[in-house]
């Protein structure tokens, strides 16, 4: 399980980062008003594990929820994650459907 302590919100590069086995998984974002646009998911080839992907995305969504922001997933992979995990649909802004 990924701890919130391991997840880094790199404000300068505008991305969430998680280092695992000397590899960097990241989700790039853009922050506008009270919305965070998740634009790109990058997971190194060496850790292409579906369970890791799920835990990484859940940790990012928990971090965003703690900041009380709405989520707009513009990356197809992240939108697919939201579609398959209904509990995160409540974090979408009013009028946004996935």
Image (tube, rainbow, N blue to C red):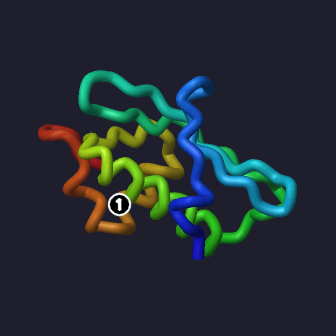
Given the current orientation, which residue lies at the most extreme left position? 94
Residue 76 image offset from top left, x and y in percent: 49, 45
Q: For this view, does 72 lie left or right of residue 22?
A: left
> Viewer-proximal residue, 7 or 46?
7
Q: Classify 77 as above or below 40.
A: below
> Viewer-proximal residue, 68 or 80?
68
Q: For this view, does 17 lie left or right of residue 80?
A: right
The residue shown at (53%, 51%) is: 77
How crowded pointer 1 is (Cα within 10 Å; few <14, some 14-19, many 20+) is rated as: some
The residue shown at (56%, 67%) is: 3
User: Could you say whether the residue bearing mark 1 is in a helix, strand or loop?
Assistant: helix
> Viewer-proximal residue, 35 or 2?
2
Q: Classify 48 as above or below 26.
A: below
Residue 58 image offset from top left, x and y in percent: 46, 63
Residue 27 image offset from top left, x and y in percent: 58, 43
Q: Which residue is mark 1?
A: 83
Residue 41 image offset from top left, x and y in percent: 60, 45
Kindly indicate the quadrant of the structure image that contains residue 71.
top left
Q: Classify 15 as above or below 92.
A: above
């Amino acid at each position: 399980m990924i701890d919130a302590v391991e997840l880094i919100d790199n404000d300068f590069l505008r991305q969430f980062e998680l280092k695992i086995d000397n590899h960097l998984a990241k989700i790039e974002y853009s922050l506008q008003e009270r919305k965070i646009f998740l634009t790109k998911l990058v997971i190194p080839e060496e850790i292409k594990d579906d369970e890791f992907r799920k835990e990484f995305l859940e940790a990012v969504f928990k971090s965003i929820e703690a900041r009380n922001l709405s989520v707009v997933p513009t990356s197809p992979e992240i939108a697919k994650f939201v579609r398959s995990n209904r509990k995160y649909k409540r974090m979408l802004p009013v009028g946004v459907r996935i």
